[in-house]
Amino acid sequence: MTDDTPSYEQAREELVEVVRRLEAGGTTLEESLSLWERGEHLAQVCQEALDGARRRLDAAVESTRATDA
């Protein structure tokens, strides 16, 4: 994660706000497209963080199974 990439929590919080603004309407087409693009980026950041967490959990479980065997 680079310095300008938000943490999972920051990305999730901003994504909620993006969705709220899109659902509320009242934005221009250009603003809506910009919000949509930002939302797509934030969703990707969140998914990558969740995928990384899943890999860590899977590795921990596998490590535990290997020591128990």
Image (spheres, helix red, strand yellow):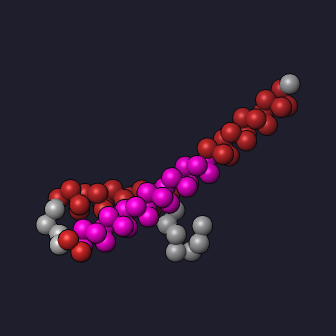
Residue placed most toward the observer, 35 or 4: 35
- Give residue 16's quadrant in the image: bottom left
Q: Residue at x 50, y 60 (%)?
A: 45
Q: Name above or below for residue 60 compared with residue 27.
A: above
**Place of residue 1 in the rendered image (x, y in percent of width and height, measured from the top left):** 60, 67
- Give residue 63's quadrant in the image: top right
Spot the residue most to the left.
Answer: 26
**Place of residue 28 in the rendered image (x, y in percent of width and height, measured from the top left):** 17, 72
Residue span colored magenta: 31-53
Q: Residue at x 21, y 56 (%)?
A: 23
**Place of residue 25 in the rendered image (x, y in percent of width and height, measured from the top left):** 16, 62
Q: Residue at x 73, y 40 (%)?
A: 60
Residue placed most toward the observer, 48 or 10: 48
**Place of residue 51 in the rendered image (x, y in percent of width and height, measured from the top left):** 58, 49
Q: Is residue 32 magenta?
A: yes
Q: Residue at x 48, y 58 (%)?
A: 44
Secondary structure that dominates the magenta span: helix
